[in-house]
Amino acid sequence: MNKQVESYLDFLDGFFSNLKGLPIDILMDNPVRAAIVCVDVTNAFCCTGNLASERVAAIINPIVNLFMLAWEKGLKKIVLLQDCHTPNAKEFDAFGEHSICGTVESETVDEIKSLLFYDEMKVIKKNSINPAQNTGFDRWLEEHPEITTFIVVGDCTDLCIYQTAMHLRTAANAVNIERRVIIPEVCVSTYDVMVEVSKDSPVEPHPADLIHKLFLHHMQLNGIEIYKKFI
Ligand SMILES: [Zn+2]
């Protein structure tokens, strides 16, 4: 392997294993100014259908715990950005059919749905991996100028999480406003497809461990804050 690639991969392992915890109390000093944006923690990616992944399902409990802790500390703005595809959506050309509006796949996972404050969460639907193209997300952001800290959780690290965190970061950078975009690593994940498996299928290879770390680091270099978890 090329030496530069090798040393970057070493660096990436170090970056990942040295991720720190972030005390939630500091963040919740003024909880009205914070929001959680939770992307695609739905049956389609966790439980059933073409794109469901056990690896992704493992983030459900950490996310539920974060929701409960944050709610108790006064954070009341939780946005659920979720796939709700039209039948024959263009995106299916790349990812196969998933999460068609109105199906079980498009619904929030039961663990989140059963939270007592679920009805107070804001569900925003999307038909692509982008949070703001043809969605109500930017309007919701405009309606809440008081929010200066965004915690982004969900899946997949390199797809919707990357797009969402980068949208929040670049939208603030473009107009020079103060904004923190924070990702707790235990609350984001991506799926795994080995090269050997992809050879006999239309699915592209997708080594989860590498891609997860690489995209977390890429977000960090863009000014998004990556922590291991809240403590
Ligand atoms: Zn989709």
Image (cartoon, helix red, strand yellow):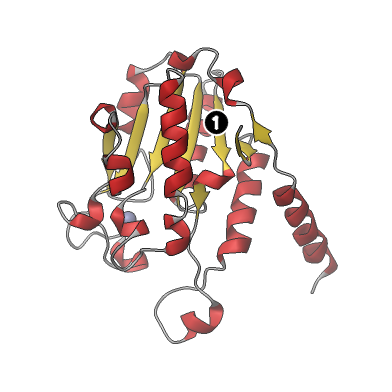
- Secondary structure under the numbered disc 1 in the rendered image: strand
Where in the image, quadrant-wise, is ligand 1 located? bottom left
Mark 1 closeness class: few <14, some 14–19, many ≥20 residues within 10 Å: many
Which residue appears at 70% of the width and 43% of the height? 19
Q: Nearer the viewer, residue 125 or 155?
A: 155
Which residue appears at 48% of the width and 63% of the height? 191
Position of residue 133 in the picture relative to residue 28 (left or right):
left
When the figure is inspected, residue 193 is found, relative to residue 85, above or below; the finding is: below
Which residue appears at 36% of the width and 58% of the height? 45
Residue 135 in view here = no
Location of residue 202 in the rendering, given as x and y in whole percent from the top left corner: 39, 79
* The quarter of the displayed image where residue 138 is located: top left
Label 1, on which residue?
Answer: 181
Location of residue 94 in the rendering, given as x and y in whole percent from the top left corner: 36, 66
Give the amino acid at mark 1. Answer: Val
When the figure is inspected, residue 74 is found, relative to residue 195, above or below; the finding is: above
When the figure is inspected, residue 107 is found, relative to residue 90, above or below; the finding is: above
